Amino acid sequence: EQLKNACLEAAQQNQTQVVLDYLQQGVSIFAENKHNNNTLLHIAAQQNNLDLVYALLSQGHPCKLKNKQAKTPLDLAQPHSQVAQLLK
């Protein structure tokens, strides 16, 4: 649980390599924030972190998962951004 929370926090702070390190240490690619069910991909999309979005998608993270507000990562991405294009 601590590693998961640290991984989610690293994603929030755009620390791509730290997130990838946590994933290698066994944190699930499907880790989600317990308050809003945002996954790592939701957070990366919201932060407009193209590198992390690409890394998560290349590791098999589905882009259609919804959070508690029924929003997908694409819904949280900045419109017309490279991140949004990658998530389409």
Image: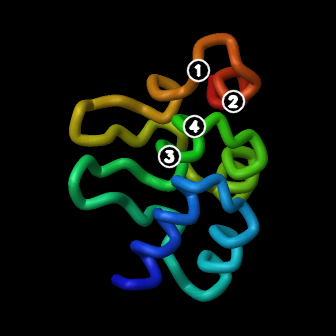
Q: Which residue does the numbered mark 1 point to in the structure image?
A: 78
Snapshot quadrant of residue 20: bottom right
In space, the residues marked 3 and 4 are separated at their CA atoms by 5 Å
| Helix, strand or loop at mark 2 | helix
The mark that comes first in sequence, 2 or 4, is: 4
The mark that comes first in sequence, 4 or 1, is: 4
Q: Which residue does the numbered mark 3 point to in the structure image?
A: 43
Is 78 left, or right, of 42 in this rendering?
Answer: right
- Checking the image for residue 83, the label placed there is 2
Residue found at x 42% / y 65%: 31
Q: Which residue does the numbered mark 4 point to in the structure image?
A: 45
Crowd rating for badge 4 (residues with CA inside 10 Å; few <14, some 14–19, many 20+): many
The x, y position of residue 82, in whole percent, is 76, 24
In the picture, which quadrant includes the N terminus? bottom left
CB under 8 Å between callouts 3 and 2? no
Which amino acid, by three-letter code, is at mark 2?
Val
| Helix, strand or loop at mark 4 | helix
The scheme the figure's colours follow is: rainbow
Which amino acid, by three-letter code, is at mark 4?
Ala
Q: Going by the picture, which residue comes out furthest to the top? A: 80
In space, the residues marked 1 and 3 are separated at their CA atoms by 12 Å
Q: How many marks?
A: 4
- Checking the image for residue 87, the label placed there is none
The x, y position of residue 19, in whole percent, is 63, 68
Which amino acid, by three-letter code, is at mark 3?
Ile
Against 36, residue 25 (above or below) is below
| Helix, strand or loop at mark 1 | loop
